[in-house]
Image (tube, grey):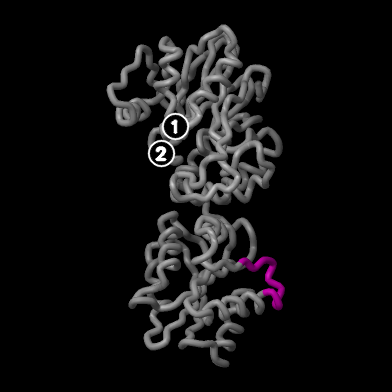
Amino acid sequence: MNNVTNDIFYIGVNDHEIDLFEGQYDVPNGMAYNSYIIMDEKIAVFDTVDGNFTAQWLENLREVLGDRKPDYLIVQHMEPDHSANIVNFLKEYPDTTVVGNAKTFNMMDNFFENFSLNNKLVVKDGEKLSLGNHELTFIFAAMVHWPEVMMTYDSTDKAFFSADAFGKFGALDVDEDWACEARRYYFGIVGKYGVQVQTLLKKASALDIRIICPLHGPVLNENLGYYLGLYNTWSSYGVESEGVFIAYTSVYGNTKKAAELLAEKLKEKGCPKVAVADLAREDMAESVEDAFRYGKLVLATTTYNADIFPFMKHFILDLTERNYQNRTIGLVENGSWAATAAKTMKAMFEKSKNIKWLENTVSIKSALKEENIAQIEAMAEELMN
């Protein structure tokens, strides 16, 4: 039995069987699917867990309930890693009232065939529900990061049940830095919806929050200003760390040499942080994370099939899909007979807001020459200004 407070209990599970979260994000340290109970005159269960952990979750639930039965199942998010066990829960506790908003119940009909409820409570934004001592307020957070998402504030314990917000990759029985995996999680999954997260943060600022209970990652109950501050920076597309991220692809090693030489020049000039990634070999989500973390980005790639190298194209699409903005970008291109990569890359950002382009572009024809070294020196100098 894992107490969050005297009345709030954690009943989630750790998943070390998963290799790719959402079929694309590498999770070497697994994943946590969180679920909670408030024990009061009436009992509320917050969300279920992934379908592979039905038995374990129900056992965790029974251990806290003892001989009592839940009054409410509050469904904050219908993504299957949180909603898969709604039907299994109701088989055991058929008299429970399922709480959600109108969009929640529409999605239940989509996910579960021949689905019916004995009792349901459709709530509106700002509506309250009393459990006895605990009073809950439901806070809608559409598109953080699905349209039906809602969050719940318990004014008694000042706990904020935040759905997928403030979540991270990684199981809870693994000790790792929060920010790294929370950042990768945020920009991979939520990053497109910065405006909606900003709206949520404004709502949250009116609440006296002492505990954040997300659906992934640890319960947060200390130094909440740190986590809220990071979310504000991320969702406003602000710069978290001063530095330069150099992302490259290279067919025969010449573009790699240019990227590495640029990194060396920046370090020599005292750049506070220089990160370099080979997009063909490093985790794409990690590279997306770094592109959003730092204020300056350099893209280095080759012309390929009258376009750009596939890994670079994938990377830029990942950035623009997530509303990449408010950054300085420099371009390095390589083309043996038709060097058009810089033009192609720049065009891919045509809808991106507040992009400042470096005046200095590096254009290589096959291999690095003296003139390219001079271009790289000029780019490094411009990046330091």
Left or right: 159 in relation to 24: right
Q: Nearer the viewer, residue 241 or 35?
A: 35
The amino acid marked with disc number 1 is His
The numbered disc on residue 77 is: 1
**How dense is the environment of label 1, judged by Cα within 10 Å: few (below 14), some, or many (20 and up)?**
many
Tell me, yes or no, if residue 109 can be seen here: yes
Q: Which residues are magenta?
A: 267-275
Residue of label 2 = 146
Q: Residue at x 70, y 39 (%)?
A: 223
Image-quadrant location for residue 168: top right
Image-quadrant location for residue 88: top left
Q: Nearer the viewer, residue 290 or 143?
A: 290
Position above or below: 221 against 290: above
Left or right: 364 in relation to 244: left
- Secondary structure beneath label 2: loop
Q: Nearer the viewer, residue 324 or 6?
A: 6
The numbered disc on residue 92 is: none
